Image (cartoon, helix red, strand yellow):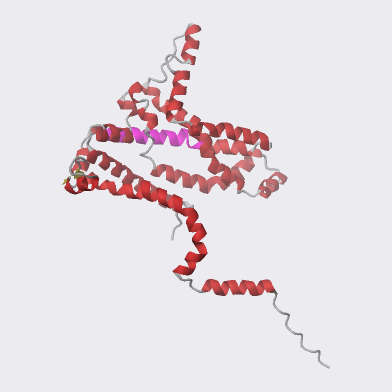
């Protein structure tokens, strides 16, 4: 006598709901349906989109004056100044590339970028690793607050603090004079200016820069450290084989972005100290644009310098991203 066939078990509600969601997702939603579904997210993004539009994309149209002998006093409004200014093609770029002062500022900027990539870029990584090793949450929170704080100071305040500490009438100089020694020139020495600005940048922004690395460290699975410790790996081996590989993608990403920003080392920090150390040591591309373009009203030359800086930044980002792909990293965007 054969056994009766076993009835198929009814599908659970969860399985049915999952299939229903998949069926709906396969259907192409109309624009109106997507808008009704996603309007809260779009509303949250609107302030940031408006900020980018007003302060970045619309002003980018002003790059057109790089190809004009722009005169803001022609016509009754800025639009008429654009329309009535003389078109000179690449004349501003020709003038720019023939000027030795411009190339001096480019060389100085690239030298500062290379120096800071070696002596400043690793500091936030080291701070994040050290801070992550602190077990007490209260001590970690206190250290974070201390190292974050200088980021919120303006460059005027930072330079003033360094002047009061290291300047000719500062605390260090007065202490050395009282001890019978001649104080060194720190704030006014062109030969050590690169060390000075790097020290200022480290004190001001290294703590803020480690936030991204702390987030990357938080994403590392703690069981990896526990398994490595159980296998006898010491602190240095755990850092070399777990921590640094976990930070590698973030390090590559930020390094690419920093290379793309190679010609942008800042403006306020240098314009505040330019007169103390001289133009030869403190003239970067941004200060050149200000003094040679805006201060003497050569608007087209200043716009041409800014456009050149942006073009170089794009080329460096694309080149560095392709190099990252060759080493197996995703970079800014994945390779297709």
Quadrant position of the C terminus in the picture: bottom left
Q: Position of residue 23 (x, y in %)?
A: 56, 75
> Does residue 266 show up magenta in the picture?
no
Q: Position of residue 239 (x, y in %)?
A: 61, 41
Q: Position of residue 269 (x, y in %)?
A: 40, 30
Q: Main secondary structure of the magenta part?
A: helix
Quadrant position of the N terminus in the picture: bottom right
53 vs 226, nearest the viewer: 53
Residue at 81% from the left image edge and 92% from the top image edge: 2
Instruction: Name the side, left or right, on which 258 lies relative to 217.
Output: left
> Does residue 102 show up magenta in the picture?
yes
Residue at 64% from the left image edge and 43% from the top image edge: 238
Q: Determine whether 45 is above or below 71 in the image.
A: below
Instruction: Name the side, left or right, on which 311 lies relative to 146.
Output: left
Q: Determine whether 193 is above or below 174 in the image.
A: below
Q: Is residue 332 visible?
A: no
Residue at far bottom of view: 1
Residue at far right of view: 1
Q: Which residues are magenta?
A: 101-123
Residue at 48% from the left image edge and 71% from the top image edge: 29
Q: Determine whether 166 is above or below 48 in the image.
A: above
32 vs 259, nearest the viewer: 32
Residue 182: quadrant of the picture: top left
Q: Is residue 306 visible?
A: yes
């Amino acid at each position: 006598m054969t056994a009766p066939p076993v009835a198929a078990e009814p599908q659970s509600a969860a399985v049915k709901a999952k299939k229903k969601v998949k069926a709906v997702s396969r259907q192409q939603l109309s624009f109106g349906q997507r808008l009704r579904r996603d309007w809260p997210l779009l509303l949250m993004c609107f302030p940031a989109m408006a900020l980018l539009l007003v302060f970045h994309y619309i002003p980018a149209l002003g790059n057109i004056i790089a190809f004009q002998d722009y005169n803001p006093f022609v016509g009754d409004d800025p639009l008429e100044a654009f329309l009535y200014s003389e078109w000179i093609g690449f004349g501003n770029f020709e003038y720019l590339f023939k000027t030795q002062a411009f190339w001096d500022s480019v060389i100085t900027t690239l030298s500062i970028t290379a120096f800071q990539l070696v002596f400043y870029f690793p500091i936030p990584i080291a701070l994040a690793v050290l801070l992550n090793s602190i077990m007490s949450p209260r001590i970690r929170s206190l250290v974070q607050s201390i190292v974050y704080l200088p980021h919120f100071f303006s460059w005027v305040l930072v330079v003033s603090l360094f002047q009061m500490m290291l300047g000719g009438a500062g605390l260090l100089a007065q202490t050395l004079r009282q001890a019978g020694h001649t104080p060194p020139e720190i704030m006014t020495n062109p030969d050590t200016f690169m060390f000075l600005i790097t020290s200022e940048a480290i004190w001001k922004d290294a703590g803020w820069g480690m936030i991204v690395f702390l987030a990357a460290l938080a994403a590392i699975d703690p069981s990896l450290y526990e398994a490595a410790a159980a296998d006898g790996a010491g602190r240095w081996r755990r850092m070399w084989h777990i921590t640094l590989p976990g930070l590698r993608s973030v390090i590559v990403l930020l390094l690419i972005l920093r290379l793309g920003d190679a010609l942008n080392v800042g403006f306020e920090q240098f314009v505040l100290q330019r007169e103390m150390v001289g133009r030869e040591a403190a003239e970067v591309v941004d200060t050149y644009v200000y003094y040679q373009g805006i201060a003497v009203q050569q608007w087209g030359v200043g716009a041409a310098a800014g456009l050149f800086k942006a073009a170089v930044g794009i080329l460096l980002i694309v080149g560095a991203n392709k190099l990252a792909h060759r080493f197996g990293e995703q970079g800014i965007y994945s390779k297709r």
